[in-house]
Amino acid sequence: MRTLQDIRAWAVHAQPVFICGLERSGTSILQVSFSRHPQLFPVKDVYETFIFANPRSALEVRAPAMTKAYLQGDEHAKRFRELCAGLRVGNAELSEADIIRAFFWYCAHQVYPGRQPLEKTPSHVRRLARMLEIFPRARVIVCTRDPVDVVASYRKRLKKEQSLGRSRDEWGWLDRTAEQLLAHFHTVSEHISAARQRWPEQVFVAPYAWITNDPETAMRRLCEFAGLPFVDAVLKPQEVPDRKVDEMLSRPISKRASESDQFVDAQTQAMIRQQMAKQMPLWDTPGTSTGIAAPGAIIAGGG
């Protein structure tokens, strides 16, 4: 069995691709697309691990369902717990950072052997510093989207979940006012800006409209950012039986017409745009802080 020192050394040299950002902004599209790349974890579907936010949950006997799915089942979840137990020195608990390192080391050697880590959890945008401190060679893609369209997407998804008769436990995270989402948007902007100051070449802002307006150009640029060769497979969706997240993930990436007028009244739209005006250059410009994805690539409006 590898030692903790081995796993720490592996994390220093690993080149994971992490996807995070605003919910309802294209993180799932990118994750399922990158999972078809032959050098990255072939994660079967959209599984959000929250490993950077709550790493100890992965050690629970009843670990979160999506964490177990990411680990491909109970047996791997058990073996991961055993690995971590063996890494402990005496009665001392593993640090959260070491649990995270061990999680991706285990996945890279036992669950998805021979592949580079790939993981997406939108809320990890609040953990950008932790991600890049633990994995100094990581490439992080942060998804953004027109803020009015984000609010509209929340409301559309909420309406759908409620119409299906699902419990509040399943849709409660969607039940947020425009004011609550604005506070969230400001926090996200602060985390992106801070991370791009410390790691200017390792945090790539990927606006939703930029991805969907020209998927091939966007995926080529994102592969380049991640140090990966472009392969056509990232643009060719695969059907996942019983997919419950979003049927659009089984279709090619494409531009969608804005539905903001159906779900957000004009007064609320104006309020959102006024309060977000100073942050839009950050959200709308694809690329790292040292170079945008293409000349004149600032995106106007959402899609």
Image (cartoon, grey):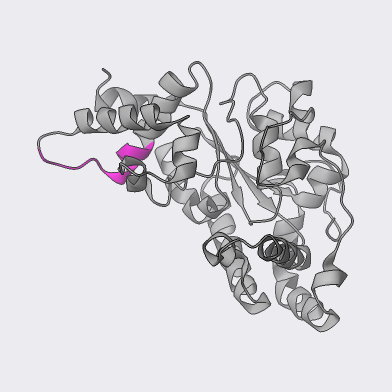
Q: Residue at x 55, y 41 (%)?
A: 47
Q: Residue at x 37, y 32 (%)?
A: 77
Q: Is residue 94 magenta?
A: yes
Camera-side residue: 160 or 202? Answer: 160
Return the x and y of residue 52 as percentages of the image width and height: 43, 47
Residue 27 visible in the displayed image: yes
What residue occupies the far bottom of the structure in this picture? 267
Q: Residue at x 78, y 63 (%)?
A: 149
Return the x and y of residue 113 as percentages of the image width and height: 48, 17
Does 2 appear above or below 63?
A: above
Return the x and y of residue 222 as percentages of the image width and height: 71, 35
What residue occupies the far front of the structure in this picture? 165
Does 265 appear above or below 46?
A: below
Q: Residue 303: which quarter of the image?
A: bottom right
Q: Residue 164: which quarter of the image?
A: bottom right
Residue 290 visible in the displayed image: no
Return the x and y of residue 285 as percentages of the image width and height: 76, 52
Q: Which residues are magenta?
A: 91-100
